[in-house]
Image (cartoon, helix red, strand yellow):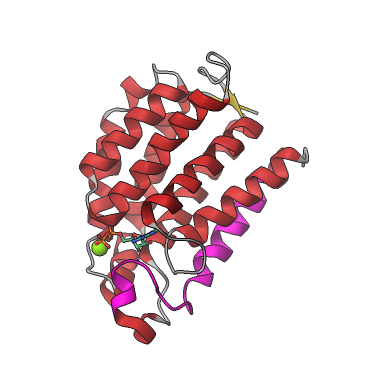
Amino acid sequence: MQIEPTLLTDLFKAINNTIDINAEEVTALDQAIGDGDHVINLQRGLKALAAQSAELAQLDWIMAWQKMGMTLMTSVGGASGSLFGTLFVAMSKAAREQFVIGEVGRSINLQDFAVIFASGVEAVKKRGKSDAGQKTMLDVLIPVAESLRCDASKCVVITEVLDNVVLTAITGMESTKNMLATQGRASFLEERSRGHIDAGAKTSQLMICAVIEILKEQLES
Ligand code: ADP
Ligand code: MG
């Protein structure tokens, strides 16, 4: 399966849509153990990306991820702005360093994407000084990166790779519910942070599942 930046327009539409539909639910989660602004922060960034989609679709992946990361860093705000921004800036850097220029041009396959995404997630861990098990977006991003890299390297059937990503994202998101938060604002609540899903884990899961939906549609067309 080959993915090109022209797909970004559809991806941003689907991502904006899923975040808008679930806005109320996620805001309630962030109000319970955070400051309630996560969805508004994220929507600001996602609208900015959608507005740039025609321009981004003209770029190669290295340039597109760099620009997407910078846009998210400057428009989202909050902890999540710098973390989501770091994900894409680091993916651009990894693509530039690990692949021969031109190889990750306008078309990327799932195996290469898996390696690049894993590098992006590593950078988020460093930026957030955090890891899995701390009740954050990383409880979705880390297992998804692992599942993708593991499946893609084993030549698992593509639809199965995508289904596993969905399952892993949902399991990771749900796993945050009973975790004790030890990073981010929710950590101030200590034991009272248990019993609520982390907002960033929820939006990460929703966005990942929206991307997979679009990739599946592309496979079928
Ligand atoms: P803020 O907490 O600054 O208001 P947001 O509300 O936009 O920022 O985002 C909160 C989300 O960011 C949390 O739900 C969590 O998933 C994620 N998060 C916060 N701090 C960290 C961290 N250090 N590492 C990883 N993720 C984090
Ligand atoms: Mg917040």
Residue 122 place in picture, x, y as percent = 50, 47
Whether 191 is drawn above or below 135: the answer is below
Asked whether, in this view, residue 27 is left or right of residue 155, the answer is left
Number of numbered discs: 0
Asked whether, in this view, residue 213 is left or right of residue 6, the answer is right
| Residue 101 appears in the figure | yes
Residue 80 place in picture, x, y as percent = 31, 53
The C terminus, quarter of image: top right
Residue under the point 65% across and 51% down: 147
**Which residues fall within the magenta stretch?**
161-188
Q: Nearer the viewer, residue 123 or 23?
A: 123
Asked whether, in this view, residue 170 is left or right of residue 194, the answer is right
| Residue 210 appears in the figure | no
Residue under the point 65% across and 28% down: 1
Residue under the point 54% across and 35% down: 116
Q: Nearer the viewer, residue 62 or 212?
A: 62
Q: Nearer the viewer, residue 108 or 53?
A: 108
In magenta segment, residue 178: yes
Q: Nearer the viewer, residue 127 or 44?
A: 127
Quadrant of ligand 1: it is bottom left
Residue 140 place in picture, x, y as percent = 51, 58
In magenta segment, residue 46: no
